[in-house]
Amino acid sequence: MPINKRAIISGALGATASSIGKLALSPESPVPSTFHSYCHIILNRYYQHENDIGWICPYVSLGTRVVCFLCMIGVNLLMVSSFLDGMNESGSVVGTALSTAANFSFSALYGILFFEEHVPISWFFGATLIALGMYLLSSVTLTTDDDDDDDKTKTD
């Protein structure tokens, strides 16, 4: 049974893009604040009068947000390309369902790993059911109308 990889990859890319977007746009994002702190550390170490050029640190923080935002757009472009390939590979219904299930699963995984989100044990039961459903959907083989027409002509 072939696994429809492109639809699953598009879901993973979608979850990755949303996590990068969270890093770019969330006020609690650790990335801009970390770069802002490093900027002050570097200025304190190498410049005696940090007050003269301390204005640069907020721009460093803003720059990291812009870079994360651009990365999010780039990953979204890859996701759309992979999603379209996945729909061609497995059909629109199966491709959409696989992509959505993969996105859901990877979003939760990223939340646990990178954002320290709490996930109840019941979620893992649901995720197991989603994984089982993804396996069943990915193992579906498509038939075309031409195949059905050939069968009809053979029986006539």
Image: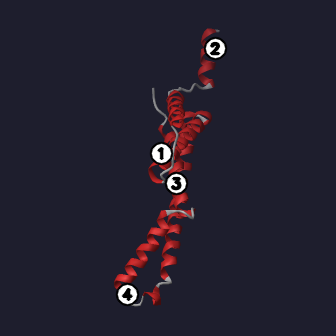
Can residue 85 be seen here? The reply is no
Give SS at disc 3. helix
Disc 2 versus disc 4: nearer the observer: 4
Where residue 83 appears, as percent x and y from the top left, is 55, 44
Disc 3 versus disc 4: nearer the observer: 4
Give the alpha-carbon distance from disc 1 to disc 4, as whole Å: 42 Å
Residue highlighted by disc 4: 47
Report the front residue among 42 and 5: 42
Residue highlighted by disc 1: 109
Give SS at disc 2. helix
Where residue 116 appears, as percent x and y from the top left, is 47, 51
Residue at x 46%, y 53% (from the top left corner): 114
Nearer-N-terminus badge (2/3) = 3
Assess whether mark 1 and mark 3 are in contact (beta carbons under 8 angstroms): no
Give SS at disc 4. loop
Give SS at disc 1. helix
Report the front residue among 119 and 18: 119
Q: At label 4, which amino acid type do we have?
A: Tyr
Disc 1 versus disc 2: nearer the observer: 1
Nearer-N-terminus badge (3/4) = 3
Where residue 35 appears, as percent x and y from the top left, is 44, 71
Number of other residues with Cα within 10 Å of mark 2, as a class: few under 14, some 14 to 19, many 20 or more: few
Residue highlighted by disc 2: 152
Q: Is residue 148 above or below residue 113?
A: above
Q: At label 2, which amino acid type do we have?
A: Lys
Residue at x 48%, y 82% (from the top left corner): 56
Give the alpha-carbon distance from disc 3 to disc 1, as whole Å: 11 Å
